[in-house]
Image (cartoon, rainbow, N blue to C red):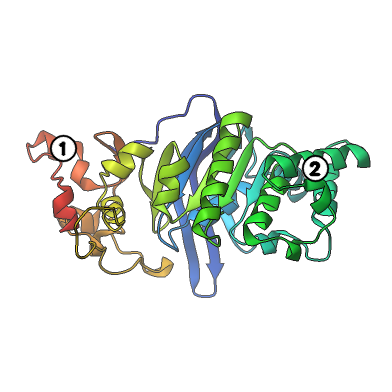
Amino acid sequence: MPVAPPPVADALLAVDDLTVEFPTRRGTLTAVRGVSFAIAAGEVLGLVGESGAGKSVTGAAVIGLIDPPGRIASGRIVLDGRRIDDLPSAAMRRVRGREIGAVFQDPLTALDPLYSIGRQLVETIRAHLDLTEGQARERALSLLADVGIPAPASRFDQYPHQFSGGMRQRVVIALALAAAPRLIIADEPTTALDVSIQAQIIALLARLAREHRTAILLITHDMGVIAEIASRVAVMYAGRIVEIGDVDDVIHRPRHPYTAGLMGSIPSVGSGLERLPQIEGSMPRLDAIPAGCAFNPRCPRAFDRCRSERPGLLQANGTLAACWLHAPERKAAGAGPGWSEGAVHG
């Protein structure tokens, strides 16, 4: 029997059975199907998967940025006990920025090149908080210092092009924090940065969660980033969550063949492997999702049921995995979970 992810105690954000559709001339494409998860204050939930898995669409739905004709077809998004997926545009704009902040992959798309970073911060702060110009300036300087911008007073009147990529991303994080939101959607926040700057941004996000009790939905394809900062992780494939659980369980004891394939493709020092395992094939197009489990054409463990019935999330020895290998009746029949990471990787 499929199960929903267990409720998170004192969840700040709860996404329940979310489905997002994009009508086209050739039919309706479903980018996200029945996705459910929750995040508590101070928690970092990693949302991981290949490009096209539905990660960014999920984040956009939470923050109310699904552009028409795209729409939330069903499900609910609840922030701090209040449903927000059905709010009018004007009300959602007040939620966005004041209660939910956003950090995107390319900081240049979030910063206006014609205005100084100080002006952008002050205007954002005053749009959401009842502060004077002077008070907003003091808060902006404090935010720049908090995110690690050296000598913020001297850089306050500089423009985005005068900052490095890593420093621009810090400014974007400061903008996301301008109104002290309780939730941040961070969509590939380190992808465009070099490795040393990535580590600094990860440490900054971790500090925000730890010291400010900010809940963070971290969307990425980088399992290294997830391992570094997330407390739990949800793995997406073809618009669905295929595995969710504590980060240590998902990374070190994956129970879905797709998750195991992702983990197996990550190089490790001293492994002695001449060639890393790979997941054969590619993710299906939205208009060509196969019957049964969407992963079955690429799965080395697929059997007949996988090709005809789509599994929901099932208890899987530590995590929840949408895989028929963990069906209770399979275990009851004495077949066991049929699980072997070696078999998946081999």
Residue labelled with disc 1: 329
Q: Decide: marks 1, 2 in contact (CB < 8 A)?
A: no
* Residue 220 visible to the viewer: yes
| Residue at the spot 62% in from the left edge and 64% down from the top edge | 69
- Give the alpha-carbon distance from disc 1 to disc 2, as whole Å: 60 Å
Residue 320 location (% of width, % of height): 32, 39
Residue 49: quarter of image: bottom left
Badge 1 crowding class, 10 Å Cα cut-off, few under 14, some 14 to 19, many 20 or more, is some
Residue 198 location (% of width, % of height): 53, 53
Q: Amino acid at mark 1?
A: Glu
| Residue at the spot 68% in from the left edge and 63% down from the top edge | 109
User: Quick one: SS at disc 1?
Assistant: helix
| Residue at the spot 50% in from the left edge and 47% down from the top edge | 18
- Closer to us: 62 or 161: 161
Q: Is residue 263 left or right of residue 219?
A: left
Q: Is residue 220 left or right of residue 261?
A: right
Residue 264 location (% of width, % of height): 26, 55
Q: Quadrant of the N terminus?
A: top left
221, above or below 216, in the image: below
Residue labelled with disc 2: 141
The residue furthest left is 334
Instruction: Give whichever of discs 1 and 2 has the lower sequence position.
Output: 2
* Residue 2 visible to the viewer: no
| Residue at the spot 65% in from the left edge and 35% down from the top edge | 182
Q: How many marks?
A: 2
**Number of the front mark, 1 or 2:** 2
Q: Amino acid at mark 2?
A: Leu
- Residue 68, numbered circle: none
Residue 99: quarter of image: top right
User: Quick one: SS at disc 2?
Assistant: helix
- Closer to us: 172 or 91: 172
